Image (cartoon, rainbow, N blue to C red):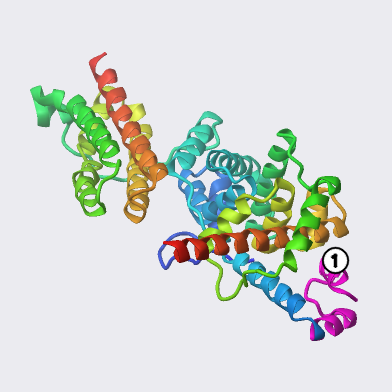
Amino acid sequence: MTEPKQHQSTEPSEAEAIERAKQGDAEAFRLLYDKHKRRVYSLCLRMTANTAEAEDLAQEAFLQLYRKIATFRGESAFSTWLHRLSVNVVLMHLRKKSLPVVSLEETTQGTEDDTQKRDFGADDVALTGSIDRLQLQRAVESLPPGYRTIFVLHDIEGYEHNEIARIAGCSIGNSKSQLHKARMKLRDLLKMNRAEKAEKSRVG
Amino acid sequence: MNCVELQQSLAEVEDGNSLEQRAHLRSCPACSALLRELRLIAAAAAELQSANEPSPRVWQSIQFALREEGLIRPQRNARPTLPSFSARWGSMRWLVPAAAMLLLALGIYVRRASLPTPLTQQAKVLVPVANASDLNDDDLLQEVAADAPAMRTQYEENLRQVNESIRDAQGVVDESPNDPDARRSLMDAYQQKSMLFEMAMDRSLQ
């Protein structure tokens, strides 16, 4: 997992900021927030596909962090600790909303069959070159919540299947299966998008 | 292994490197293309990490909650003391609420200007707003210190935060002038500053 770039300045190190935050130093809280806000907020936004919800969840994640910071002993990286905490906040939220953290197999059968039929269609649009970031972002947002959770955790956030299984409360096999289906669904969405664009430019 | 079996097997062995998968992929251009596309998606997804910036509202809310819960210990600021607000301004105290009103008016102007306006015009509209973020801050602090010395640190910190929020929000608006969320965040930040001025004035008139 990548870390945000460090600024060349007289700012305290992260370890110093953590120690100062444990003493209730407002500036240290702010420094930690500034360093990790993008990662935490992006995670929340990807998993909920909703700006307002993502902001509320990012806020909740940082508040939980600050409430618990006195218990942080440095056994794991701070960013890992914060990230795991943020994932838990989002998953808890999804469960409260009764959204499936992991898709139910029976609700995805139709999608899978459709996907396989389309894969071997005669007029398939090839997905080559680079994938537009915004298009991919929108496609991820339109995934069913269960697919989206696994895809975000694995392909965007870099979690392994065994970690996802533990966090999301599913089997490793289920995580792998959901990820594959999510990628197939994304492929469909991106291809449809390209086909629509090609059609528009042909007509217009 | 046929095409359907290959697809199903990619869930378990996603890189397509098992013996059976490789044998099928060598003879099937469609499945080879499928595997390439899935890899392309996975690679592009990794680039999405940390792509978004939360609005300044998030930090404001966190800070507020931290203060409410007593988790933040106010910091002493070593800024030099300025002459008293009353001594400097005397009968001009009305400038403080006027400044608050000006901030609000500018904010409203920004919101109106955010409707379909050419980008160059929008940039011009934002220039006076950015300058307004420094409006009479020291005078406000002196006024607070004179009337309620214990509150000065609190106001100072709030002012610093709200000015930072305005700068952050302005930066986002500059980057994405047509983003309604960014403009709303800027408006919120100005409204918070306006509220600070009004609160200080209410206190000084009591």
Q: Which of B48 and A29 is in front in this view?
A: B48
Quadrant position of residue B185: top left
| Segment tinted magenta in the rendering | B1-26
Look at the image and tell me in which quarter the N terminus of chain A lies: bottom right
**Identity of the residue furthest to the left in this view:** B91
Badge 1 marks a residue whose secondary structure is helix
Q: Above or below — where is A45 with respect to A94?
A: below
Compared across the picture, whether A41 is left or right of B8 comes to: left
Q: What residue type is labelled 1?
A: Gln
Q: Residue at x 30, y 42 (%)?
A: B114
Q: Which residue is drawn at 86% across and 59% down?
A: A172
Residue matched to label 1: B8
Please tell me whether residue B17 belongs to the stretch shown in magenta. Answer: yes
Measured as percent of width and height from the top left, residue A109 is found at: 83, 51
Q: Residue at x 70, y 46 (%)?
A: A145
Please tell me whether residue B195 belongs to the stretch shown in magenta. Answer: no
Measured as percent of width and height from the top left, residue A174 is found at: 85, 56
Q: Is residue B142 visible?
A: no
Measured as percent of width and height from the top left, residue B75 is found at: 42, 41
Binning the other alpha carbons within 10 Å of mark 1 as few (below 14), some (14 to 19) or many (20 upward) gives: some
Q: Nearer the viewer, residue B10 or B126?
A: B10
Q: Above or below — where is A182 with respect to B181?
A: below
Compared across the picture, whether B1 is left or right of A67 comes to: right
Measured as percent of width and height from the top left, residue A175 is found at: 81, 57
Q: Residue at x 25, y 20 (%)?
A: B204
Q: Which of A118 and B73 is in front in this view?
A: A118
Quadrant position of residue B154: top left
